[in-house]
Image (cartoon, rainbow, N blue to C red):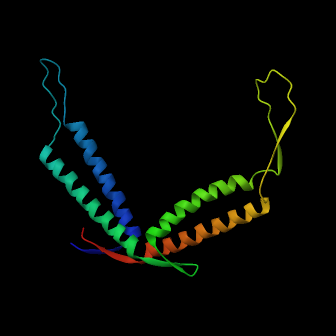
Amino acid sequence: MHMKMTSAYANKMLKQLAEDKSYWVNKENDSCLYSAAVGETPVIPEYDFAGVSATIEKIDEKTRILKHAINLANVTGEVDVNGSRMTIDVILIAMAQLNKRKGFLDSLRRQQPQSRKSAGFYSSRAVQPEYQYINYDLDLAKSEYERVSKEIMDMQMALDKYNQTVEFEAAV
């Protein structure tokens, strides 16, 4: 059966499939073995190996189909981000790169132009104080942090709109 859906809907379906699979895997783990003491009438859990295996395989197949459909949509779907056309997969890659850069820029923007380094807690000799100095323009680091943050936000907004509105077809 072919269905049209948005990426947001497909991801909700994937979450539901993962929950269903977890249920069946746990049920299988809890039911595939049982114990009984000698002379005791065993309590045998209800378990159908073939049925549970088939159910898990159907869930895995639907998951593969949905993920493939999302991947196809990600490499073909394009959105505008500040005047540039970008595919969804490129946006996802760029956002990961920019988020890593943003973390480094955040550490730069929080530095003091000059700070005293500690001599170490277990130092047995008196040491002259040592200072650490930044080797960059602090205002430039702050403005670059803001620029990267805005770029990430713009990409996220375009991605959110795409995920909520653009439909693709999946054979689930």
- Quarter residue 71 falls in: bottom left
Q: How many marks?
A: 0
Residue lying at the far front in this picture: please name it.
135
- Where is residue 57 shown, x and y percent of the image? 20, 54
* Residue closer to the observer: 156 or 95: 95
Placement of the C terminus among the 4 image quadrants: bottom left
Q: Is residue 57 left or right of residue 126?
A: left
Q: Is residue 119 above or below residue 137?
A: above
Q: On the image, which quarter does residue 125 sit in?
A: top right
Considering every residue shown, the one lying at the far bottom of the view is 83
Q: Which residue extends farthest top?
A: 38
List x then y, in percent, for residue 42: 14, 27
Figure quadrant of the N terminus: bottom left
Which of the 4 image quadrants contains residue 73? bottom left
Q: Position of residue 37 (x, y in %)?
A: 17, 20
Left-right relation of 119 to 19? right
Residue that appears at 76% across and 64% down: 140
In the rendered structure, the answer to whether residue 160 lies left or right of residue 75 reads right
The residue nearer to you, when weighing 3 against 133, is 133
- Residue at horizontal 48 percent and vertical 78 percent from the top: 79
x then y, percent, for residue 31: 21, 37
Q: Please name the residue shown 12% across and 47% down the image.
A: 50
| Picture residue at 24% right of the left edge, 56% below the top | 59
> Does 45 sit above or below residue 155?
above
